Amino acid sequence: MSHMLELENVHSFYGHIHALKGVSLHVDEGEIVTLIGSNGAGKSTTIRTISGLLNPRRGTVILEDQRIDGLPAHQVAGLGVGQAPEGRWIFPKLTVLENLEMGAFSRNDSDGIADDLAYAFDLFPRLKERIHQQGGTLSGGEQQMLAIGRALMARPRLLLLDEPSMGLAPMLVELIFETVTNINRQGMTILLVEQNALMALQVAHRGYVLQTGEIVLGGDAKELQTNEQVRKAYLGEE
Amino acid sequence: MSPTEVLIQQLLNGLTIGAYLALIALGYTMVYGIIELINFAHGDLFTFGFLISLSLFRLYGATGTLVGFELVWLFTTVLLLTMLLTGILNVVIDRIAYKPLRKAPRLAPLITAVGMSFALENIFANWYGSSQINYPDFFPRVDILREWFQMDTFVLFTTQDLLLVGVTIPLMIGLRYFVQRTKLGKAMRASAQNANAAAIMGINVERVIMTTFFIGGALAGAAGMIFGNFLHTGRYLMGFDAGLFAFTAAVFGGIGNITGAMLGGLIIGLIKAFSDQYLAAQWTRAVIFAILILVLVFRPQGLLGQGEAEKA
Ligand SMILES: Nc1ncnc2c1ncn2[C@@H]1O[C@H](COP(=O)(O)OP(=O)(O)OP(=O)(O)O)[C@@H](O)[C@H]1O
Ligand SMILES: [Mg+2]
């Protein structure tokens, strides 16, 4: 069986900066896979390389049976890759509703879109209360909800989440991780980038550890949680 | 003319000038909003609209004032064709001159735009010559207040002024509707606010940019044609002045802001009319550019902008 997503020996650059040095990983249908690593490890670069914002100089990215490396971002999105990027990238002067509508840009099934809008408001009732407010006026937590809701509006086959818990109060972090688990239970395949390794490994099925552009460890999330090296480096233990 | 009549006359003049300046200003502001380029060649699209519409009328064989059914259909057809062709020209300019420089430092496309402006002006000079061009009264000219309303006044408001307002206002309302309510319009605003975010939503940002250039060009083309039917004279360099005034209007309203461009156009139109009347026409440019400088110094984001200008 082919994987939902597979990266093979991917090298990405920013000018002369060699940010990914041969990354290989895969995500299977129905999984939550987490990618953890410290600042500057290349987590966001991996996400950008998958979504086509950055094209790898070497290696392949395969979505189901199709090569997507080299495709522009809007085409990758059209193939079913949704994303809540690092920094959220809310459209500041579009309303909450318009932001969500933009998430469904590639779709034309107005009934399905209406259903998914209801679903997004179900997940995050707070967004419904703010429906006509401009995106830029939302709090950080609300913006994160909107970013996730907007990504879901595309009804993606694969959801990329880049540090959804960044900068949020503990209660909100809790809520976001709960939501991630929930949407995964309903069948969504998720690649979750996190610095909050502890929580990420608790919700994920599998995980990879990225260090200066290379995958140094990978495996079952439970096992990674008990791994000596991971505990020292990322779970803040002596 | 009594002082009151002079005042009313200048208000009317200001509004009509403002209306076509606003149409041109929209093209500056929309393109700036999406790729942060001051398209210095934009004023020349106004000239193109003037020239191509005149050519289209001539092609049909029109030489003088049209009436009745012929007036309606020919005028509408020429207007639509002019908008279409000017829109296409603007898209072609973008493809040739700006798109290859999309990722280059901002100065590169800016200078290319200046070069493009010179290129267009020279093409126009070869096409229509470099002297004044006469644009006939294709649209009937009736003194509305005196002839239709039997008012005893020196204030002049003609059917040609009405035409100008009657074309520009619906175009602006249509544009606002497009940008605010339609899916493509929303994608346009989204792309202007964050192009990468738009791309990961599945929006083809290059296509949105193309649409923006098309609409901006079409509006400038309409302005050129309406201007011809309103002032009846033009020249291959006419887009330079109109462009600078419209650009000032766009900055005044807040560059990147569509409502701001409309408002800025109106205000600059009024200032021009009043300066022409109460100072002297030869002072008007100085007044307008003094205002441009003051705005840039004291409120660079313009009337309705929200700090976007700082990105520049
Ligand atoms: N636009 C860019 N231009 C140049 N270098 C970049 C750019 N973006 C990232 N880098 C570099 O690439 C490397 C990987 O960055 P990346 O953003 O992928 O890290 P990350 O793992 O997501 O870190 P964080 O946890 O801080 O978000 C870093 O060394 C970073 O400095
Ligand atoms: Mg990152």
Image (spheres, coloured by chain):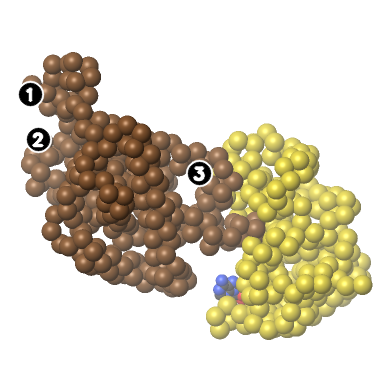
Chain colours: A yellow, B brown
Question: Considering only vertical position in the picture, is B310 above or below B116?
Answer: above
Q: Nearer the viewer, residue B190 or B141?
A: B141
Q: Residue type at mark 3?
A: Val
Relative image position of residue B91 (x, y in whole percent): 43, 61
Q: Which mark is residue B179?
A: 3
Front tag of 1 and 3 = 1
B263 lies left or right of A87: left
Q: From where the camera sits, is residue A221 visible?
A: yes
Front tag of 1 and 2 = 1
Question: Considering only vertical position in the picture, is B298 above or below A189?
Answer: above
Q: Which mark is residue B1?
A: 1
Residue at mark 1 to residue at mark 3: CA–CA distance = 43 Å
Q: Nearer the viewer, residue B77 or A132?
A: B77
In what quadrant of the picture does the C terminus of chain B appear?
Answer: bottom left
Residue at mark 1 to residue at mark 2: CA–CA distance = 14 Å
Hey, which quadrant is residue B175 in on the image?
A: top left
Q: Which mark is residue B278?
A: 2
Q: Residue type at mark 1?
A: Met
Residue at the image point whose x is 80% and y is 66% from the top: A34
B182 lies left or right of A208: left
Hey, which quadrant is residue A159 in on the image?
A: bottom right
Residue at the image point whose x is 27% and y is 49% from the top: B61
Marks 1 and 2, the one that precedes in the sequence? 1
Tell which subunit mark 3 falls on.
B
